[in-house]
């Protein structure tokens, strides 16, 4: 009699681990990519602006093509991040944003340029956020401003075949995944509109916590940012320094079959970038190996 062999359990889908260049701001871009690659990551989250890739500098297109070749040689996936602090105004952090007055056009132009760069890089997505309310602007007016401006960003994404990852941010108009879904609905649920979830943010603002936020994003999830936080403050912390249930987060990603990029985002830790990259990778590798 031939023994019956039980079928092997299905392989667990895992994200590709990455590291954000905003946590390596003291390194030139090629050196930052060396750190990412040699540490063991398979992806990089590229923040446009100083010091790595100026989206408005002369020769930006040529530099983007060269970067594409470099990323291909290194075997690194890439997402494009647009959260550089002083990209558009040297005196005002993250301004203008999509909720501001007439100078919001500069933010739209920046996001369109980010989409053009993402197209060249064959990036997984362009991650972006709504912005905080300007002085004297209430939520109703802010929503009225946001939808038509985002519709132009969506149109550019459609033209270039690029996905968008709208990121809910604590303190911004689009603060939770539910807010991002509302915006997507206001725009007619365009397929280009995906969602970025920052795991640390879930500790601060998501009523359903990290598992609830990831499940609410569901198959719209196109980008994951990894950091720890405490409920009382929007401050990116090294893994283990906050209260994020990292194991639950990655079990939920496995449950969803998420195979995109999950990149560590520690924008205030460039002074210890190589150490943070190595320790984060070790912790995340441990977490993912524990998921069967």
Image (spheres, grey):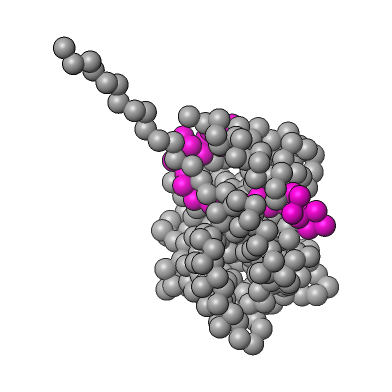
What is the residue that sits farthest to the bottom in this orientation?
A: 58
Residue 142: give x, y in percent of width and height.
65, 61
Pick the residue in front: 5 or 226: 5
Residue 155: give x, y in percent of width and height.
46, 71
Instruction: Mark yes or no: residue 259 visible.
Output: yes
What is the residue that sits farthest to the top in this orientation?
A: 1
* Residue occupying the point 53% across, 60% down: 76
Q: Is residue 268 magenta?
A: yes
Q: Is residue 288 magenta?
A: no
What is the residue that sits farthest to the front in this orientation?
A: 1
Instruction: Mark yes or no: residue 218 visible.
Output: no
Q: In the image, is 31 to the left or to the right of 40?
A: right
* Residue occupying the point 42% across, 68% down: 161
Q: In the image, is 160 to the left or to the right of 230?
A: left
Residue 93: image quadrant is: bottom right
What is the residue that sits farthest to the left in this orientation?
A: 1
Pick the residue in front: 235 or 97: 235
Pick the residue in front: 25 or 176: 25
Tell me the quadrant of the picture where the N terminus can be found.
top left
Tell me the magenta residue range. 248-276
120 relative to 85, above or below: below
Residue 160: image quadrant is: bottom left
Residue 241: image quadrant is: top right
Pick the residue in front: 179 or 285: 285
248 relative to 226, above or below: above
* Residue occupying the point 49% across, 50% down: 260
């Amino acid at each position: 009699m031939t023994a019956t062999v039980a079928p092997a359990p299905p392989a667990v889908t895992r994200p590709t681990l990455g590291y954000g260049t905003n946590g390596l701001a003291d390194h030139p871009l090629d050196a930052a990519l060396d750190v990412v690659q040699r540490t063991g990551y398979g992806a990089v989250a590229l923040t446009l602006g100083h010091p790595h890739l100026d989206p408005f500098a002369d020769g930006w297109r040529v530099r983007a093509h060269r970067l594409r070749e470099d990323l291909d040689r290194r075997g690194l996936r890439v997402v494009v991040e647009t959260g550089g602090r002083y990209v558009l105004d040297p005196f005002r952090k993250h301004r203008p944003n999509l909720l501001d007055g007439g100078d919001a056009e500069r933010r739209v132009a920046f996001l369109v340029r980010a989409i053009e760069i993402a197209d060249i890089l064959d990036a997984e997505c362009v991650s972006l956020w709504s912005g905080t309310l300007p002085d004297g602007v209430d939520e109703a007016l802010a929503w009225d401003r946001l939808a038509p401006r985002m519709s132009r960003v969506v149109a550019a994404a459609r033209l270039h075949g690029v996905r968008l990852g709208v990121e809910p941010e604590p303190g911004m108009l689009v603060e939770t995944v539910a807010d991002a879904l509302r915006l997507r609905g206001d725009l007619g649920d365009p397929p280009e509109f995906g969602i970025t979830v920052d795991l640390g943010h879930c500790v601060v603002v998501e009523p359903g916590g990290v598992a609830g936020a990831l499940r609410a994003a569901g198959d719209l999830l196109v980008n994951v940012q990894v950091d720890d936080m405490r409920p009382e403050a929007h401050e990116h912390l090294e893994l283990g320094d906050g209260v994020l249930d990292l194991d639950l987060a990655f079990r939920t990603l496995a449950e969803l079959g998420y195979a995109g990029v999950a990149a560590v985002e520690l924008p205030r830790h460039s002074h210890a970038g190589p150490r943070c990259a190595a320790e984060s990778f070790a912790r995340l590798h441990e977490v993912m190996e524990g998921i069967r």
